[in-house]
Image: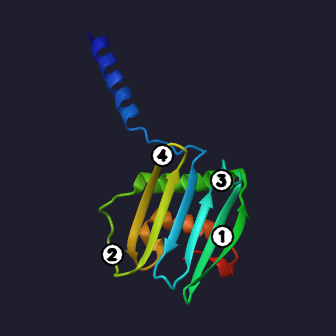
Amino acid sequence: MKQFILLTFLFSLISCSKNQKVDQISRESELSIITYGAPWENQFQAIFNPVEISKDTLFVSKIKNENGKETKSTEKIELNPSEIDSLYTHFQKIKNNFNLNERKSRVLDGTSVSVSISNNTSAVHFSYKGLKKAENADPEIEKLIKFINTKLPNKFQIY
């Protein structure tokens, strides 16, 4: 009888741990973060696509809109395997920690941040709106932006 109770307990622990497993982001997923605000402010896009574009390059675009004319400049950041792991870790934490109802402060017509994780069959998007600055979206967004900014020239920093 004791063995039966012990086995039942062990099986219930195993089944609970399987149910709580977090879906890991596939290493073939495209990762992107976009920060934007008013139409006359700079917009930034950082895209990592290990399958279609380049296996080890993060593309960061800065889009300016002056007098209705849009100009786009792009920086290419070569990442080593450890940096690619860090990038996926940042996105995984953003995905795991996103809470739709947790925005603490909002400003009218503030900065917005959009994070996307996608592959051939599905996509997930997380949006943060009404922020004073992009880093206020979430501590993990702040860490991701800092990680990307360490790779960019000073004139090209995401904000």
- The residue tagged 3 is 84
- The residue tagged 2 is 105
- Measure the C-alpha gap from mark 2 to mark 4: 31 Å
Tell me whether circle 1 and circle 4 mark residues in contact (CB < 8 Å). Answer: no
Label 2 environment density (alpha carbons within 10 Å; few <14, some 14–19, many ≥20): few
**SS of the residue under disc 2:** loop
- Amino acid under disc 3: Ile
- Measure the C-alpha gap from mark 3 to mark 4: 21 Å
Q: Position of residue 151 (x, y in %)?
A: 68, 68
The quarter of the rendered structure image containing the C terminus is bottom right
Q: Nearer the viewer, mark 3 or mark 4?
A: 4
Q: Position of residue 87 (x, y in %)?
A: 60, 56
Tell me whether circle 1 and circle 2 mark residues in contact (CB < 8 Å). Answer: no
- Amino acid under disc 1: Thr
Q: Nearer the viewer, mark 2 or mark 4?
A: 4
- Amino acid under disc 4: Ser
Q: Position of residue 30 (x, y in %)?
A: 58, 52
Above or below — where is 60 with respect to 117? below
Q: Nearer the viewer, residue 95 or 112?
A: 112
**SS of the residue under disc 4:** loop
- N-term-proximal mark, 1 vs 2: 2
Disc on res. 150: 1
- Measure the C-alpha gap from mark 1 to mark 3: 14 Å
Location of residue 3 by image quarter: top left
- N-term-proximal mark, 2 vs 4: 2
Q: Nearer the viewer, residue 94 or 41?
A: 41
Disc on res. 122: 4
- Amino acid under disc 2: Ser
- Measure the C-alpha gap from mark 2 to mark 3: 32 Å
Tell me whether circle 1 and circle 3 mark residues in contact (CB < 8 Å). Answer: no
